[in-house]
Amino acid sequence: MANSGHPHNGLKAVFIAQRETILRFLRARGAGDDAEDVLQDVWLRIDRAQQVPVGTPLAYLYRAANSVMIDRYRSRRQSSVREAAWVESQTGGDFAAGGAVSVERIITGQDFARKVEDTLSTLPERTAAIFRRSRVDGIPQRVIAEEFGVSISTVESDLRAAYRALSDLKEHWNED
């Protein structure tokens, strides 16, 4: 395939031409309902990537799709572990009879988690996404800056804005 000027034209053209094939690959690998989202993340990666010709674009796209899918799975798993740790920290290790967390504490935790999501949804999209990449996915700020095409100080500024919003939420939550 001839590259017409821009090094990404070939990779993007292969992506567009093979979109359905890559989508089937993701579903076969277990992406399920997330396959479309994974594909969107792959597109964003190749759109933001350094402009270098790729020798085997389809193989590159399969690897990128698989990598994004695995990253999403790990992120979800880490989130579950953190949520369990948070619930445990909020219960102070107090468990109801039978070793189960009390229903009231579970409901309170779920309500607070919803409030956190609501708070994040009020932030600018980039700010919320940077917060999630940093705090949920555990990605270093330097890497986040590269992913979003911004400076590290912009990442830090977005994180401060997210922390401020969540701190305000916690203050109001404790007042209720």
Image (cartoon, rainbow, N blue to C red):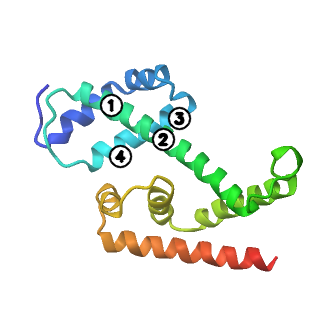
Instruction: Give left or right: position of 123 versus 111.
Output: left
Q: Which residue is mark 1?
A: 16
- Asked if residue 20 is positioned above or below residue 149 in the image, the reply reads above
Tell me residue 159's x, y (percent). Answer: 46, 70
Which of labels 4 and 2 is toward the front? 2
Which kind of residue does numbered mark 3 sit on? Asp
Q: CA distance from mark 1 to mark 3?
A: 19 Å
Q: CA distance from mark 3 to mark 4?
A: 15 Å
The numbered mark, 1 or 3, whose residue comes first in the sequence reads 1
Tell me residue 133's x, y (percent). Answer: 45, 56
- Asked if residue 46 is positioned above or below residue 166 in the image, the reply reads above
Q: Which residue is mark 4?
A: 44
Count how many numbered circles sit on residues in the image: 4
Which kind of residue does numbered mark 2 sit on? Arg
Q: Residues within 10 Å of mark 1 (few under 14, many from 20)?
A: few
Q: Which residue is mark 2?
A: 74
Q: CA distance from mark 1 to mark 2?
A: 27 Å
- Asked if residue 120 is positioned above or below residue 8 in the image, the reply reads below
Q: Which residue is mark 3?
A: 34
- Give the residue displayed 63% in from the left and 67% down from the top: 119
Which of labels 1 and 2 is toward the front? 2
Which of labels 3 and 2 is toward the front? 2
Q: CA distance from mark 1 to mark 4?
A: 13 Å
Q: CA distance from mark 3 to mark 2?
A: 14 Å
- Give the residue displayed 25% in from the left and 25% down from the top: 59
- Asked if residue 12 is positioned above or below residue 107 in the image, the reply reads above
